[in-house]
Image (tube, grey):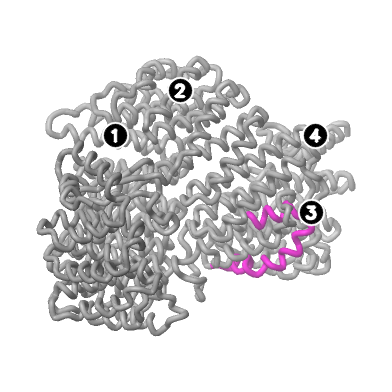
Amino acid sequence: MDEQEFVQLLESLLQPDTERVKAATANLNKTYYTSPASLTALIHVLTSHPKAELRQLAAVEARKLVQKHWASIPADQKGTLRSQLFQSTLDDDVTLVRHSAARVVSAIARIDFEDGEWADLPGYLQQAATSSTARHREVGVYILFTILESVGDAFPGNLSDLYKLFGTTIQDPESAEVRVNTMLALSRMAMLLDPEDDPKSLKTFQDNIPKMVAVLQSTVEQGDEDHALQAFEVFQTLLGCEAALLQKHFGDLVKFMIELASTTSIDDDYRSQALAFLMQCVRYRKLKIQGLRIGEELTVKALQIVTELGDLSSDEEDITPARSALGLLDILASSLPPSQVVVPLLKAIGPFVTSPNPDYRRAGILALGMCVEGAPDFIATQLHEILPMVLHLLEDPEVKVRAAALNGVARLADDLAEDMGKEHARLIPALVKNFDLAASSNQGQDGERNLEIIRGSCNAIDSLIEGLETEDAAKYVSELVPRFSSLFQHSDFKSKVAAVGAVGSIAAAAEGAFLPYFEQTMHALAPYVTIKESQDDLDLRGVVCDSMGKMASAVGAAPFQQYVRPLMEASEEALHLDHPRLRETSYILWSTMAKVYEEEFSPYLAGAIKGLQECLKQDETEMEVQLGEEAKDLLGSEVVVQGRKIKVASATDDDDDEVLNAEDMDEDDDWDDIGAVTAVAMEKEIAVEVIGDIITHTRRNFLPYLEDTVTSVLELVEHSYEGVRKSAIGTLWRTYACLWGLAEGDGMEKWKPGIKLQVQPTDTLKKLGNLVMTATMRVWQDEMDRGTVTDINRDLAATLKLCGPAVLVTEQGNVVTEITQQLVSIITKRHPCQQDLGDEAEEDILEESSEYDWLVIETALDVVTCLSVALGLDFAELWKVFEKPILKYASSQESTERSAAVGSIAECIGNMGEACTPYTSGLLKLLIHRLSDEDSETKSNAVYGLGLLCEKSNNEQEILKSYMNIFEKLEPLLDDQGQARLLDNTAGCVSRMISRHPNNIPIGEVLPRLVQLLPLREDYEENKPIFKMVVQLYQANDPTIMQLTPSLMPIFEKVLGPPEEQLEDETRAQLVELVKYLQKQ
């Protein structure tokens, strides 16, 4: 081997000449790196060359070759190489070289330890870590860190000795490097520690936490940025380990980070890191945070930090404490109960929005906007107080405050569409006023600020308008469309995008009222459908296609027909322009076209399916990233590489020039650690949802593509990204429902309730049902993401209701027991998605829930209800299991929980029919008690349930004994004319009681009051029992009903007229016959 040429080639790799680097790389790979001697030569360069940069490069290259060549090096050379390498690593005076060399040591040790060699290395490292020379201590601890990282619990030394060592080095009096390296090593020890098997090590580790906090605090106080970031990263790592490690000091640690984040005298980077840690705490330790009741303190401190936003444009993406604080508020609101976040926030922002300081006024509305998505139900109840505040801020003299208020309107409207939509008469004029003022003065130094108002007005109306009733939205078309259309040619790209998006939403909301503007709008936007010269062009093209899709939905198939082909051709071209967002836009457009044209979408079906299948087949793992000096600016940020969003970090600041190649990595371990969501994954999520839309709307025409599509989607059910898992399972169930509908259309008998199938589905349905249910159960039981569990609940509930019990039977038998187990675990808050990361099920279940946490439970109750629909009488056996946990919610302190539980109980009674008889006593007691509930929704559900129980139960003795008590409780409800649903349900309840026991009710007293409640105003389902009872009394020639005929005839006329959904077909036919009979009398 020519060592001189070898060194020259290595030196060539450091030159700024790309061609020379390529040639040298090729020569090294071909001529030298195939031989074990190259590894020996690299170690020689690393241990003896005078140039630090060449030693650094040799370390990087040697580490790559260790796995390949170390075993082939003669045993008599290995000892010398180990000794030289270890000593030079200790003595090198350049930190980066020492760290890279340490990685070579650990790579060799990984192989040697497996072979029982280099047994004296742990002892040497212990000596180095306790040396009187600081540099030796630094290197000794760092090598220990890299070895623990590399070999894990295969480390041959005694781990308890390491804990003892690190307990000393974490307090090194001289070197911050030693202290921080100890933290890095401890973070690796944390990954190996099993608290149950090793309580002694757990205690030792816990005792080190305060010392680790002291190290972090010291690096921050000294402005030691590199070490501080590493220390922060260690604490982030510990959040992903066993919960017991931090448990003892968790509250103190959180409070330390809150104080750090709130201290304005320290560097913003440190404050942002502290806020990032708090966000992760709330995400992965929300039950601990909730239990400590520090949500309010976090909320109020975050609100204060938001006041520091300054004059940064809202479009800048720099990470600042104020932006991080907004992110913290967002995750707090979605993770903790409203009592800990939104309630204290609303209390705190009062003085903020009336402050003379515009930064405080802006902070108040921005903070509120960030919390809407996490607690929409609670915020909806407070709109009467929030709205005047928002309207006041829309009139603020400061542009930045008005811009924030516009953002607040958009966020409120996004999550409270109907509630905000009802306030259109106050909001839209205020938004238009802001737009006009900015548009008329968009000159000079305030130009950019005015553009912000223009964009904000467009975005606010974009969000708000879709919450309006069609007839209300129609009133604003002539006022809004000309204003926004004038921006289609605007020089400011972002204003143009905002205007195009708003016009699309106006069209979607106003429907037919948009027709007069349809042709001219399409003509104005047409040039943007094919633009592709720049990224901005492609972004705009995507928004234009989105808006055109909304216009198609608004005006309907015929007016839009001429635009379909060119738009579809442009969307297919967009797949090949290397722009993920534009590809997603194409898929969404196909979904819209399928909805508008249904079976007539067939000519484009083959092309759409081809594009969607190609999306699903995209590879997400093949990646090679070269990070050199020029990439240093990317540290801490996210980059998209071949579709994979990667966080660029420099935890150990070594190996800067190393090529990260997916093929060289241990797939399972390393990619799991990255934990990134890729652009390709997000694209697949959209594509799978669109497939579901297309199947649903093209129905029979999709059948030729069905098998391949189902196969592709099934492969994504256990995808690493929850969005893909969620959409894959949803699309599979939609496919099943579509096939079921087709089979019924082809003559398959309507299903009948019961676990023993009385109607056999087709073979295709059996096969698909087995595949989808098996896949769903596999994901459902271990799923950590609550949104995915919520959606699975919804999918199962909808399918059981539509398709009955057939889905409950798989090739392995029926899955009722497994489904019941999953539902009980969710309802009792013991499902994996309801636990903190690294925790087993909590012993003490917290009573309060965030709105999203409650949604998981509420949708599980929906599955219980739909299970009762599918099983009918057979559900009674399951009620034994569900009764206790559901009754607990029926007595909850939260009205939403009581309402949902009582509603679920009522539906289950109705669905299991007479099989509810054994449970009559307990259910009767609960429902009568809830007739006095302070919440009208709960009360209404209790009335509904009581009616069903009186109708279905065969325990007549118990029921009749309570009749007078029930009437006494119902009577006061009849006076509340403001509660339409409550009155409707009361009418239904009394009708059921009369139908079942006409001789036990004073009909002469009750019926006239009942007739006064007719016709029903809201809950039309109750018309069925009411008119069944009416017909029954006429058939029995009841004297009271005969006397009431003059009052009933106008009621009959109204319910037989529009709207059609007032009566089911069977009830309508009975009523028509009755009216004919009465007219003859």
Residue at position x 72%, y 68% in the image: 880
Task: Report how far apart the C-alphas of labels 1 and 2 lie in the structure.
Answer: 22 Å
Q: Nearer the viewer, mark 4 or mark 1?
A: 4
What range is drawn magenta here?
863-892
- Disc 1 residue type? Arg
Task: Report the residue that reaches farthest toward the left.
Answer: 50
Which structural element holds mark 3?
loop
Which structural element holds mark 1?
helix
- Disc 2 residue type? Phe
The answer to if 887 sits in the magenta stretch is yes
| Residue 455: image tag | 1
Q: Is residue 73 above or below residue 494?
A: below
| Residue 747: image tag | 4
First-in-chain label (4 vs 1): 1
Which structural element holds mark 4?
loop
First-in-chain label (3 vs 1): 1
